Image: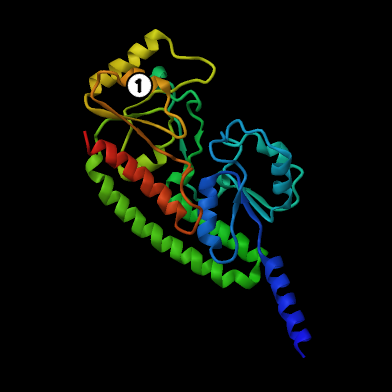
């Protein structure tokens, strides 16, 4: 009497497991957006481990396998993950470079004429696309909308859940945007410096602007003249903050700030320490806001 019921329940479990969509993203910020949309139906995976550079990542065999087995794959685009286009040629399932999404607000790095050559990020060519597009809430909303549509197409039975998750994400983003604007409005005009030009989308959204970029080329260490120029910029700025990114603070930060009214702090545009979950994307932006405000308000 119980065997048919047990068999039926087992079949239901198998069908439920089979229905779960394997969603894979290249970088963690996209994984955090996907986690909001996929909440309750599955857990998105990420290709790059914490601390790995999206610019120069070497795929392992397990990474290639994950790419081939994923139902859906999302990446920023060839301007960031330049190692991916060739690998994706052998992939059967859908892949989306989100930088190509219609309606996305895209920014480009300033031209050499507009920016002091010593103050430009060596990792980003003048005029090239600024790929840190996830740091604008409006862009995150568009990415989430596309993910919800793709998930519904791959898993029609869960369409209502994806749409509910998407609606909740939109509502939370609107509230988050208001909170961040209120938190950051009084910081406009306060000078600060960064080691990586990654925050232009976030800054443009909330009326901030870094005063300079202390870029470090991995191949070439800054010479004495360049270091002196950087210190001069800090001296002219007066009390200020210099932000690096985890996991390591550049040794140059100590050299530049020695004896000056400079506070050293961290910003994490990739959300490396943020737990993956439906609220993860909001945590990423809140952490950026708190990092900026926590340092600049103490000046």
Q: Total marks drawn?
A: 1
Left/right of residue 193 with respect to residue 56 in the rendered view: left
Between 236 and 66, the residue placed more toward the observer is 66
* Residue 121 spot, x, y in % from top left: 45, 25
Residue 239 versus residue 271 in the image, above or below: above
Which residue is situated farthest in the bottom direction here? 1
Q: Residues within 10 Å of mark 1 (few under 14, many from 20)?
A: few
Residue 130 versus residue 2 in the image, above or below: above
Residue displayed at 51% across by 38% down: 131
Left/right of residue 180 with respect to residue 245 in the rendered view: left
Quadrant where the N terminus sits is: bottom right
* Residue 105 spot, x, y in % from top left: 46, 45
Left/right of residue 261 with respect to residue 76 in the rendered view: left
The secondary element bearing badge 1 is classed as: helix
Regarding residue 245, the answer to whether it shows in the image is: yes
Which coloring applies here?
Answer: rainbow
Residue displayed at 26% across by 28% down: 240
Quadrant where the C terminus sits is: top left
Between 280 and 165, the residue placed more toward the observer is 280
Between 201 and 70, the residue placed more toward the observer is 70
* Residue 89 spot, x, y in % from top left: 74, 42
On the image, which quarter does residue 116 sit in?
top left
Between 297 and 107, the residue placed more toward the observer is 297
Residue displayed at 44% across by 40% down: 269
Left/right of residue 94 with respect to residue 262 in the rendered view: right
- The residue to which callout 1 is attached is 254
Regarding residue 115, the answer to whether it shows in the image is: no
């Amino acid at each position: 009497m119980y065997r048919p019921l047990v068999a039926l329940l087992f079949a239901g479990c198998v069908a439920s497991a089979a229905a779960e969509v394997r969603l894979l993203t290249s970088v963690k910020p996209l994984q955090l957006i996907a986690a909001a949309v996929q909440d309750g139906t599955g857990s998105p995976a990420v290709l790059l481990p914490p601390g790995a550079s999206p610019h120069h990542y070497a795929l392992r065999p397990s990474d290639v396998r994950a790419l081939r087995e994923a139902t859906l794959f999302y990446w920023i685009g060839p301007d960031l993950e330049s190692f991916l286009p060739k690998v994706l040629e052998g992939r059967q399932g859908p892949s989306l470079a989100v930088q190509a999404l219609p309606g996305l607000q895209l920014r480009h790095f300033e031209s050499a004429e507009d920016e002091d050559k010593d103050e430009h990020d060596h990792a980003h060519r003048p005029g090239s696309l600024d790929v840190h597009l996830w740091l604008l809430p409006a862009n995150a909303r568009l990415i989430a909308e596309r993910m919800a549509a793709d998930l519904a197409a791959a898993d029609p039975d869960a369409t209502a859940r994806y749409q509910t998750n998407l609606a909740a994400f939109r509502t939370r983003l609107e509230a988050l945007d208001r909170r961040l604007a209120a938190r950051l409005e009084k910081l406009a005009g306060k000078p600060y410096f960064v080691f990586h030009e990654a925050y232009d989308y976030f800054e443009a959204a909330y009326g901030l602007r870094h005063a300079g970029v202390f870029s470090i080329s991995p191949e070439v260490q800054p010479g004495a003249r360049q270091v002196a120029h950087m210190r001069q910029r800090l001296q002219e700025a007066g009390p200020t903050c210099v932000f690096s990114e985890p996991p390591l603070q550049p040794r140059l930060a100590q050299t530049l700030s020695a004896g000056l009214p400079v506070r050293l702090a961290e910003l994490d545009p990739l959300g490396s320490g943020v737990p993956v979950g439906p609220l993860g994307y909001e945590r990423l932006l809140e952490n950026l806001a708190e990092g900026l405000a926590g340092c600049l308000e103490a000046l």
